[in-house]
Amino acid sequence: MKTKERIVSAALQLFNEQGEANVTTNHIAAHLGISPGNLYYHFRNKNDIIHQIFLQYSDHLRKGFTPINGPASASPAVWFHYLDAIFYVMWEFRFFYANLNDILQRDDELHRQYLEVQQELTINLQSLLRELNKQQVLAIPDSEIEPITEILRMLVSFWVSYQSAQSLTPHISQAVLYEGVSRVLLLLKPYVQPEQGLEMAKLMAHYQALATKPSDPFHK
Amino acid sequence: MKTKERIVSAALQLFNEQGEANVTTNHIAAHLGISPGNLYYHFRNKNDIIHQIFLQYSDHLRKGFTPINGPASASPAVWFHYLDAIFYVMWEFRFFYANLNDILQRDDELHRQYLEVQQELTINLQSLLRELNKQQVLAIPDSEIEPITEILRMLVSFWVSYQSAQSLTPHISQAVLYEGVSRVLLLLKPYVQPEQGLEMAKLMAHYQALATKPSDPFHK
């Protein structure tokens, strides 16, 4: 990895482990064993690094939720794909979700980019739900596609914040985030067509098992 | 009103209008035309005032969601009561929801009280949903009462934060909060028994009309 990439990767790791507010550019440089000057050669400041991380985040959101059309969209493998993509983005960028409004409110350019990618995501999620309706996997009334998409986005975006409020000593483990993924399934469950009930039960069981698993010590 | 009550009421108003972080005890005193010394006679600091506001918040949560038992719980008037209580608490204490994690994380005692009242609220909401099941208004599978209660609490607690992230110049109007109330109904809609469909449609129409109403200039 080039130094620039190593800086971004170390920053993401430290932000996730210690909270973005507690990590300075000096911490990042020290963690990598490079001089602050070397870091400043690549990035003007911490916000500059956050912008770089945000590009990765946007990229995952765009690729992870590109709708698949036709009968292929109805296969259970596709559900696993989307639900794992939700978990991945929540886990990989949890520092961002832990502090979403603070980070957005202090940086209008980042906020603009966030709104842009959320707009694309909204369109993708709506197409995805409409396609699942068409393939008779779901039966969501047309007028409810928009508000349900919104609730899903909200649930994923604020699950980390919600969990942080629920304890004096919150610990955002992988299990906690898989619980969020299970809630996404629960929200969609009433709209699942009866013929798909068995597949749905399997999906629920899969993510609920992950949600009750004790923390993996290697992935705290 | 006594000076102490006037301070709490002015603080709540200013926090809601300008954001809690932007309001100092000096602002509050100036707003009331009293000296800072007079304010400090009643409250040691801003946190002390927030604790007082939090007591009002807890009181509303406790009273607003006390479950009603028996057939009375199935009357549409009861739905209006609970949904209006959700709106009231979101509107009246919107500064708190706008900044929930910041406010809780800097004050362990407040956070402890918050967890206590949320625990009571959870028990009340679960009894309420179970009673509505019993009265054949809802048909929520037993195993889903808990996670659905959790999603409802999350939706109400983070609706303001979610809306703040969705715009470069967010404005938390009454209409925006009524939209949150509509989402609560939407979440419960799939579990409403068919015989109650008409009542549900009326409720939805009522809150959706409030959600699309232009801001009342007297209640910005």
Image: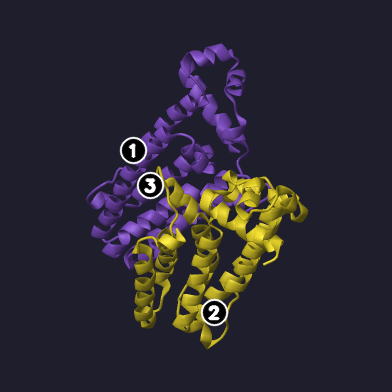
Chain colours: A purple, B yellow
Q: Residue at x 41, y 75 (%)?
A: B192
Question: Which of these two is toward me, B22 or A176?
Answer: B22
Question: Which of these two is toward me, B63 or B120?
Answer: B63
Residue A58 vertical position relative to residue B144 in the rendered view, above or below: above
Are the residues tagged 1 and 2 within 8 Å (C-beta)? no
Q: Position of residue A26 (x, y in %)?
A: 60, 20
Classify residue B28 as left or right of residue A123: right
Which of labels 2 and 3 is toward the front? 2
Marks 3 and 1, the one that precedes in the sequence: 1
- Mark 3 falls on what kind of element? helix
- Mark 2 falls on what kind of element? helix
Q: Residue at x 39, y 75 (%)?
A: B203
Residue highlighted by disc 3: A82
Subunit of mark 1?
A
Residue highlighted by disc 1: A63
Residue highlighted by disc 2: B131
Distance, label 2 to label 3, CA atoms, is 36 Å
Residue B50 vertical position relative to residue B106 in the rendered view, above or below: below
Q: Residue at x 69, y 59 (%)?
A: B52
Q: Are marks 1 and 2 on the same chain?
A: no
